Amino acid sequence: MKKFAWIWITIFLALSLAACSAGDSTGLTQADTSLSSSTVVNESSVVVASAQSVEEAQAENSQLHEEASDYTWDPAVVIPITLNGDSISADATDVNITGSTAIIGSAGTYSLSGTLTDGQIIVDTQDETLVQLILNGVDLHSSTSAPIYVKNARKVVIILADGTTNTLDDALTYGDASSGEDEPNAALFSMADLSLSGSGSLVVNGNSNDGITSKDGLIIAGGTITVTATDDGIRGKDYVDVENGTITVNAGGDGLKSDNEEDTTRGYITIAAGVFDISAGGDAITAQTDVMISGGEFNLTTAGGSQAKIDATLSAKAIKGVASVVVDGGTFKIDAADDALHSNGSITVNDCTFDISTGDDGMHADAALTINNGSIQINQSYEGLESTIITINAGSIQVNSSDDGINGSGGNDGSGTQAQTTGQTQGTLPGGQQKPAGGPGGRQGGGRGQDTFSGGSNATLYIHGGWIVVNAYGDGVDVNGSIEMSGGTLLVSGPVENMNGALDYNGTFNMTGGFLIAAGSAGMAMAPSATSSQNSVLINFNSKQQAGTLVHVQDSAGAEIFTFASAKEYQSIAFSSPQLAQGANYAVSLGGSDSGTQNGGLIQDGTYTPGISYTDFTISSVVTQIGSGGGMKP
């Protein structure tokens, strides 16, 4: 990649995409064939290409410290260490015991059991081989420091014995807290590479600062791990790699964190599998470089959730990778005060199930956002999808937003810092709640105002497939540049106020395939451009139509083109379909009923009972406009 150039200088993007077909004759597809894409970020000759899979992103980062032998041992050579309340006993010259402190001075395998009311286990060895600590039902407390402190070692593996529960409880205040950043500040603290494995349980209470910290790499290979921390829950400076396990974190700071700022091949998080329940005052999952997720079940809450009011300086994102976020799979339930997914670089979603409520953006990437597949439900957001380059190749996407639904911003985006106008109260949010004044959840001032882009109109939205539904109180689709649509289905229930539009772009909207319906106010109504190869129609109605009022279009033979019910009041509708033919005649009806199944407002596989005949029209050009209105030419 690499990885940080766009942070220091203005972003200018150009995208090179392979051409793709228009899809089937109807354009109504929910999962079109995915396309590969590559993003070139041009910044004073610095080129940054976004990784398209977890495997590709991992190949650009430093190797893990894990070896197969880390998790095996010879029971015959295990050294027992017994905790006796206020003392420690061990029959080994390599274990130096002073009162309630034991210093392990050699590599080997050690089994710890019992309770220590106030003491410490320290690993301090120059040996180049492995230290293994088997926790066999320990209850470790310290009133002055970290109960387990790896001061020096090549690598330490902590094994949670099957069927055991182990507890680490550190001091409220460390006696050596001011001694430097390499001094302990977590209940489980390691200066060396650290791994956790086994099928037992570990309960960690980080009363002073962090719960689990490695100043090198951290691997979690298994176990049931519960962390409560005043600041960060689980931190690996060089990387955090989770292979499996059940992980619960309640942290005042960040939940899962990697923050090496000195090496662009480090500071990453990889997650292969596991069950995660993370509640964080800051970010739930945050990496200085890449977050790479292959699978797992995630329940992520930040800063009290999407209804919370937070300071604009606080980062409270659910998943943040400063360089990139790549998701190959997983199931995510997110309730975030800030963005749900965020990157200063790129986000790539290859497959997943997302259920998102957020106080800011659903997915925000400064450079590029690519969705290749998956199910993405954004129940609440300020803006749903936001990036300079947005590419949707397949998947099912539902966006609810108090401002723009899909926002392609290549210019300075100050909308997040401006108070929204009042009066947009018609319509409801999910769950039947009335849409609040101001930002999401009634937060006055809209979004959090931290998303700033470079100048110019260089943003682009590419839609090659997928089933995309937008319900927006700002612009439905707003691109400071151009839109290219060659496949898929885009259904927009747009704004009710004339200052916004269901479609808003300042370049061109080339429609070469797929199916489009965009309903909303008439003042700024737009349709695809006349440069398109597929016909489109823009109807500006004589009066506003109530939410749910059906629009039905059929050809001269009575064959249905579509029946659509907007989620909100509307006075215009733009639509495009491969079925719209030059010179052909069509009829428009309003109201009535339909027995079919509704998805995103589009009703299919039913019988339409006519309402009022509104108008007939003939396709006379690439863009046919009916009725007056619209502040911008289609």
Image (cartoon, rainbow, N blue to C red):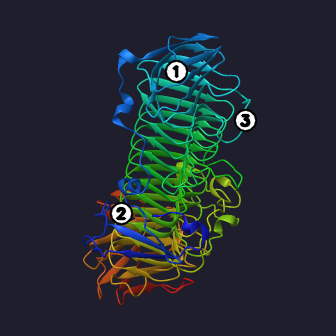
Q: Nearer the viewer, mark 3 or mark 1?
A: 3
Residue nearest the observer in this picture, 386 or 292: 292
Q: Nearer the viewer, mark 2 or mark 3?
A: 3
Label 3 SS? loop
Rendered view: 303 above or below 422: above
The image quarter containing residue 603 is bottom left
Drawn side of residue 143 relative to residue 378, left or right: right
> The disc labelled 3 sits on which kind of residue?
Ala
Alpha carbon distance from label 2 to label 3 = 53 Å
Drawn side of residue 299 relative to residue 382, left or right: left
Residue at point 45%, 42% (across, down): 241
Asked whether the viewer can see residue 340, the reply is yes
> The disc labelled 1 sits on which kind of residue?
Asn
Rendered view: 564 above or below 378: below
Alpha-carbon neighbours of circle 3 within 10 Å: few (<14), some, or many (≥20)? some
Asked whether the viewer can see residue 548, the reply is no
Q: Position of residue 111 (x, y in %)?
A: 46, 18
Residue identified by numbered label 2: 466
Counting the numbered discs, the total is 3
| Quarter of the image that includes the N terminus | bottom left
Alpha carbon distance from label 3 to label 1 = 25 Å
The image quarter containing residue 439 is bottom right
Task: Say which mark, if any, is on residue 166.
Answer: 1
Q: Position of residue 457 (x, y in %)?
A: 54, 80
Label 1 SS? strand
Mark 1–mark 2 CB contact (< 8 Å): no
Q: Position of residue 96 (x, y in %)?
A: 58, 18
Q: Nearer the viewer, mark 1 or mark 2?
A: 1
> The disc labelled 2 sits on which kind of residue?
Gly
Label 2 SS? loop
Residue identified by numbered label 3: 177
